[in-house]
Amino acid sequence: MSTSALRSPLLRVRGLVKHFHLPRRSLFHAPDVVRAVDGVSFDIWRGKTLGLVGESGCGKTTTGRAILQLMRPTAGAVYFEGTDLCQLSDKDLRPFRKGIQIIFQDPYASLDPRVTIGTAIAEPLMIHKICQTKEEARERVQELMRRVGLNPYFINRYPHEFSGGQRQRIGIARALAVDPDFVVLDEPVSSLDVSIQAQILNLLQDLQAEMDLTYLFIAHDLRVVRHISDRIAVMYLGLIVELARGLDIYDAPLHPYTQALLSAVPWTDPRLARQHQRIILEGEVSSAANLPSGCRFHPRCPMAEDRCRVEAPALREVRTKHWVACHLV
Ligand code: SF4
């Protein structure tokens, strides 16, 4: 790989927008628009992980799907190794599909209960013509099973015969079967017990190092992405409100929303528990179909001023490699 390829990001997202139109309430009403993702930009370098964090409904999952073109963005660009995926037809996207994969929160929902896990893991190998024969595919599946910590002896078993953690390992094997460059991890450990979460996170880190994988790790819990993320982007109502190196987010968060999210984590590390005193946010998250004026966080922000109600703050680099969208920072 050339030095310039190493220096430029593998993935560049620019001004990504995804709006959904709700059905009209009546003939006389314009359809409501849900602004799920409303102009999101970031870069991810090869072999690195960006954690994308926020409460449910903030647009993080939609961002992941729009990047993968599983749902086409309303506007913006997604450059993968320099090619804007948003400009490609479904046919021209096909060669890129192999390089970009997704791992879901609930692998059980994405596995056909009537299909053995061997067949499920082999499917992408056959679709992308990576293996020419069934024997070749079987060998590759067994190798993948070993790699993700599953006993290859279970190749002919069905999804219901596995635990939640094992099923997530099957989902990982399936996504990695085609040797991708970039993987969206959409809440991959949220449905698992804490002890199993740590095992899956360690596995994902080991695989990243072995296979030079690049991750977008989506989570609602800042604790989960702490060890795996090089940088973290915090989303609120369709926008990134803070983006910085992981260390800076945990030790010196600048946005009031990030501070509140960190304070809600039950830290086992006493230093972090002392550092992030509980901040109770008043009110509910507003709807992406009826966004507040000015700063979208102002109805819940303990520091809101008059200006915040009318003027939307821009995302600015306030310290080296630390971007924040807040008038007071
Ligand atoms: Fe709070 Fe105002 Fe900053 Fe928004 S701009 S986060 S309302 S202080």
Image (cartoon, helix red, strand yellow):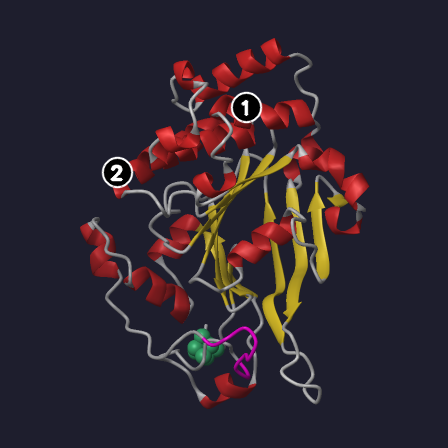
Give the overall secondary structure of the magenta segment. Answer: loop
Which image quadrant: the N terminus?
A: top right
Circle 2 is placed at which residue position? 195
Question: Which residue extends farthest front?
Answer: 114
Residue in the image at 33% along x and 60% along y: 262
Based on the displayed image, in which of its 4 quarters is residue 166 positioned? top left
Residue in the image at 38% along x and 37% along y: 201
* Disc 2: CA contacts within 10 A as few (<14), some (14-19) or many (>=20): few
* Ligand 1 quarter of the rendering: bottom left
The total of numbered circles placed on residues is: 2
Would you say 300 lies left or right of 87 here? left
Q: Is residue 6 magenta?
A: no
Q: Is residue 124 above or below residue 312?
A: above
In the image, which is nearer the foreground, mark 2 or mark 1? Answer: 1
Specify the segment rendered in magenta.
286-294
Three-letter residue code for mark 2? Ser
Would you say 156 lies left or right of 166 here? right
Residue 38 versus residue 157: which sits nearer the camera? 157
Would you say 90 lies left or right of 43 here? right
Image marks 2 and 1: residues in contact by CB distance under 8 Å: no
* Disc 1: CA contacts within 10 A as few (<14), some (14-19) or many (>=20): many
Three-letter residue code for mark 1? Thr
In the image, the residue with mark 1 has its CB under 8 Å from the nearest atom of ligand 1: no
Based on the displayed image, in which of its 4 quarters is residue 192 positioned? top left
Q: Which mark is residue 119?
A: 1
Q: Which mark is residue 208?
A: none
x and y, in percent, of residue 230 in the image: 46, 44
